Amino acid sequence: MVRSLLSGLAGIVLLADPASAADAPPGASSCTGCHAPKKVADSVIPHIVGRKAEDIVTFMREYRSGAWPSSVMGRIAKGFDDQQTQAIAAWFAAQPE
């Protein structure tokens, strides 16, 4: 139930900008379910659109290894290898804020 809800929300977020959604790498939609395309005031979930790709890759590796504990991100990060993480990070870094 939660997974289908998040998938639906991710699709809605990506549909908000169909031009950038068309070239999104596989897996990017799993990020947009929580990380909003625009900055949200007082959100504990960081804004990743336009962030440096190197930073996103570093955070994902730390979540994957358990060096940076989390309730959700560690499990998500383990689902991507380095190549997938780099593609997703590069795509988010290239998106206009």
Image: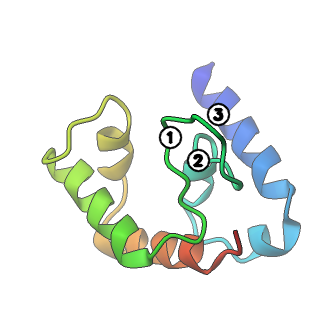
Quickly name the residue at label 3: 6
Q: What secondary structure is marked by label 3?
A: helix
Tag shown at residue 33: none
Q: Residue at x 56, y 49 (%)?
A: 30
Above or below: residue 50 compared with residue 61? below
Residue 2, by quadrant, is top right
Q: Position of residue 28 (x, y in %)?
A: 58, 60
Give the residue type that dot 1 points to. Ile
Q: Position of residue 18 (x, y in %)?
A: 86, 66
Left or right: residue 61 versus residue 90 is left
| Residue named by callout 2 | 35
Residue at image position (67%, 75%) is: 95
- Separation of marks 3 and 1 at Cα, in angstroms: 15 Å
Distance between the alpha carbons at the discs numbered 2 and 3: 11 Å
Which badge, 2 or 3, comes first in the chain's sequence? Answer: 3
Question: Neighbour class for label 2 at 10 Å: few (<14), some, many (≥20)?
Answer: many
Name the amino acid type tagged 2. Answer: His
Task: Check contact, mark 1 vs mark 2: CB within 8 A.
Answer: yes
Which residue type carries mark 3?
Leu
Crowd rating for badge 3 (residues with CA inside 10 Å; few <14, some 14–19, many 20+): some
Q: Which residue is mark 1?
A: 45
